[in-house]
Amino acid sequence: MDNFQKIIIIDFGAQYTQLIARRIREEHVYCEVLPFSSPIQTILDQHPAGIIFSGGPASVLDPDAPALDPEIFNCSVPILGICYGMQFTAHALGGTVEKAAQREYGRVSVTFDLSSPLFHHMHPTSCVWMSHTYAVTQAPAGFTSVASSSNCAFCAMQNPEKQIYAVQFHPEVTHSEEGQMILHNFLYEICHCRGDWTMSAFIDNAVLSIRKKVGPTDRVLLGLSGGVDSSVAAALLSRAIGRQLTCVYVNHGFMRKGETESIRKVFTEQFPVNLITVDAGQAFMDKLRGVSDPEQKRKMIGSEFVNTFSKQARQQANTRFLAQGTIYPDVIESGSVKGSAVIKSHHNVGGLPEDVSALFTGGLIEPLRMLFKDEVRQLGESLGLPADLVWRQPFPGPGLAIRIMGEITPEKVDIVRESDAILREEIQKAGLGKTISQYFTVLTNTKSVGVMGDERTHDYVLALRAVTTDDFMTVDWAKLPYEVLDSISSRIVNEVPHVNRIVYDITTKPPATVEWE
Ligand code: XMP
């Protein structure tokens, strides 16, 4: 990403660090996150247009508090400290940080000094999101306070001569009414960014760098799972190197209705690549016969997937590179900011056997490595992938198999697949597709008595699951309108054989999880 102007975000361990990064990118400025332990030279080697210090849970007064070499303040690069970042700045430069008389948490009304470039185009007073126990009580020499609340004299401070700015609150969260403007001002009024981070510039840049890496006769192999990331990676690689790309799509037989066909269509007609589809449904079903333990199911599907993919990979003797759809949160969360060694050809695959990895002498190609999920979707749209693929809801690697309680049989797979298709149709018809984060059906291992026509039935109980969430770490169950539940229920019991009762899962996560297995 050397062609883009860059902001470096120093992560002091805040829960909001990725959010800061996303907000910066929304302003069309590229940014990367580095850990606070990074040597100064590593930061400067990136030639940042500006540096942002994130918040963090520690207190700067602790002897082993996270810190960066204070030489950073003499590097003539504009700095914005946020929350802990402000306290670190004050402490390192000789100001005073103390435990606040009153802890501030939540919305707080703040008065801004509009002459500060950080607060241009803002209202004199607006609400911000605070979350701190410690506060700056005396600014370092050369700094002045440029925002205050009834509780806190230093809600923001600046030293314009040294281009150092800091805020005690969180401009990155939407509760801070004019937070985005503050970030915008830092980028454009203080760092003088050009705003060169656009999807079309990213595509041009990525296509060139892929072509530079992959010679005209080299081949690249990609494991296509049908998920957003691997599909977008395949589309981008197809744009760059066309049929030099071979995609292996392992159909384990647990995909949703119509998915395999649509993947095949996209990657043969719209993005013509060398597509190898392995219809391994029978092999997976054979392996799973008699297995009902959830973990065992997952493990068996994972290892059978690796075996199937590896077999294909071994047959691609002249293939130099392995591509995968790793995205930026995976990179940040794995803690490695340089070169990941983990090979992820599928969600649930820990890694490929060594002899298979060794086949790819050119190494890994991860064209989405620096993108957030929302950017991957934007990229998919810019490349022209169909909306249903780009906006696909999360889907577990083992697919419908972990939505069937107990032993898996072809009949049970048909029940979940058909009922899932009906649920999806009804949710779309009701216009709720974008408001619910994930929805699916689960086949319980229970049968109940019912009556159909004049006949007694003894058939399956099927559960509906629909959740809302921002991050899938915690979820709420979706409050679906009764009429929608009604039409889903009556369609499923009428159209899907062997289901005579529908229940709705009304548990949050925690204590439940999203998936049932
Ligand atoms: P749980 O059930 O753990 O799920 O609350 C959280 C989110 O992760 C998805 N999920 C998976 N995604 N591979 C994936 O890529 C998996 O094996 C897997 N299992 C669960 C789940 O659908 C939900 O969105």
Image (spheres, grey):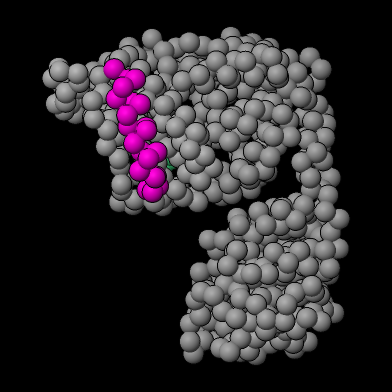
The quadrant of the image that shows the N terminus is top right
Q: Is residue 405 above or below residue 496?
A: below
Q: Quadrant of residue 161?
A: bottom right
Q: Main secondary structure of the magenta part?
A: helix
Find the residue positioned furthest to the front: 454
- Foreground of the two, 18 or 381: 381
Percent position of residue 311, x then y: 51, 12
Percent position of residue 181, x then y: 73, 67
- Foreground of the two, 100 or 171: 171
Give the magenta range: 477-497
The quadrant of the image that shows the C terminus is top left
Q: Give me the residue at 63% from left, 89% from top.
A: 153
Does the magenta segment cover residue 231? Answer: no
Q: Give me the residue at 79% from left, 14% from top.
A: 217
Q: Quadrant of residue 198?
A: top right
Image-based side of 192 in relation to 278, left or right:
right
